[in-house]
Image (spheres, rainbow, N blue to C red):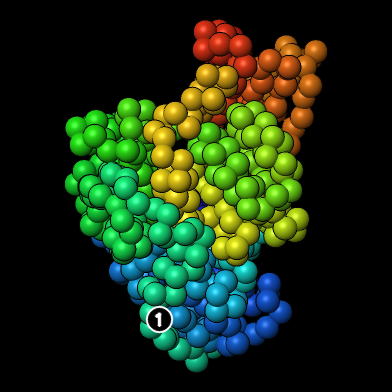
Amino acid sequence: MALDPDIFKAYDIRGLYGSQIDGDLAEQIGRAFARVLGGLAGKPTAGLRVALGHDMRLTAPELHARYRAGLVAEGAHVLDAGQVATEVVYFLIGSRELDGGLICTASHNPKPYTGAKLIREGAMALSGDTGIGDVRALIEAGLPPAPGGGSVESVDWGEQFRAAATAFVDPAAISGLKVVLDGGNGMAGPTVGPILERLDLDLVPTYWTPDGNFPGHEPNPLLPENRELVIAAVRESGADLAIAFDGDADRCFFIDETGEFVAGDFITALLAGSLLRTHPGAAILYDLRASRAVADTVAAAGGRAFRNRVGHAFFKRRMRDEGSLFGGEVSGHYYFHDFYCADSGTIPALLMLELCARERRPLSELLAPFRERYFISGEINSAVADPDGRMAAISEHYADARQDTLDGISIDYDDWHFNVRPSNTEPLLRLCLESLVSHADMERRRDEVLALIRA
């Protein structure tokens, strides 16, 4: 199979099984990854200790074995966790001070996809410009004969991981809630499920068993069509809330008791406000697409809010550099200083359950101050032939606004703002816009900007 450079993304490796990624390529990726890790760690590949896992996809066991073979061929000692969520690999790397890790996953993508997330020491993700490009270059150049000599050790992660995640909350405080769960037939069931089952909750699990056929729906809760079933379950069961997870369970999403989806920036604001009660003055990161609800909430709670460019590699690096307590992205990634600055689906689920149980108020009531003041568009994608030209036109059109180019272009007025940024993988521009005036004003501004994008 000829190497398709398109599989090397900004934050991971991802492509179609068979036509873009097969077993032979997976083994080469494993070998090249070991060599990149050795360079980053400043040690020979024979001295590396690397975590390995795979998700529930039908092709994952085969490819997992080939990634493992590649790592072993380079002399690495592999700690094999088997079928796990991505956050478990982060946990193993951080808690056991490993040199890195690889999980065979395509996250939230549809059934035909596969891929790998590559992580270095400290649970820091490799990205396109810090490691993934080097893996590609090594494969393109042709790998030399492998030295061999590696080894494999099976690891039991369950109780240690569950104890670490549960330490973020007071389990006794989480009681009296009816919760619908949607695992998307991904990795949430075996990861967060055993923790939730020990709590005083009335659980209504749906699509909770890993199944790479995805018989319910694709494991991407950001798409409205994939939320229809869990929303119906909330309304029919009279639940207090629902929690939906993506395929590899490193993200979670919330639906309130009325069946309304909760935007990720509002969850970031709620979690930040709650965490600052016990960590006054802490630094909080939020992505530059987010509602001003985040910065306003952090300021009101006595914290320090910092905008950050989108992407988990950038969040983790800055959290580590600055000692930030918590970070949240609109996309549903939530990062925790005390979880090796990594993202988790389990921890925010537990924190939100604790918050709802302590407040003893409906989730919609907790969200009302945000929904009544901040009117957000959500992310809107537009296919364009010339992304750079469109962003230049936007900059010129809004020349009287405060502008920055931290990630795409951000336009900022006192009572409304937006960000337009290019996709890392497609000829798309992504718009997130907010008005502090009204929903109607948001729609008017949104349509105005979309007209410029799509001109």
Q: Residue at x 24, y 34 (%)?
A: 238
The residue singled out by tag 1 in the image is: 155
Give how far across and how far down residue 406 sits, in percent. 73, 37
Question: With respect to residue 339, does 430 lie above or below?
Answer: above
Question: With respect to residue 178, does 455 lie above or below?
Answer: above
The C terminus - image quarter: top right
Give how far across and how far down residue 149 sits, in percent. 50, 92
Report the side of 194 relative to 453 (left or right).
Answer: left
Q: Amino acid at mark 1?
A: Val
Q: Residue at x 64, y 28 (%)?
A: 292
Farthest-out residue, bottom:
149
Report the side of 207 relative to 440 (left or right).
Answer: left
Q: Does residue 15 appear in the picture of this structure?
A: no
Question: With respect to residue 46, does 349 lie above or below?
Answer: above
Quick one: SS at disc 1?
loop
Q: Which one is in front, 162 or 310? A: 162
Q: Residue at x 71, y 43 (%)?
A: 303
Q: Which one is in front, 244 or 136? A: 244
Q: Residue at x 20, y 36 (%)?
A: 237
The N terminus - image quarter: bottom left
The quadrant where residue 126 appears: bottom right
The quadrant where residue 302 appears: top right
Give how far across and how far down residue 432 sits, in percent. 57, 26
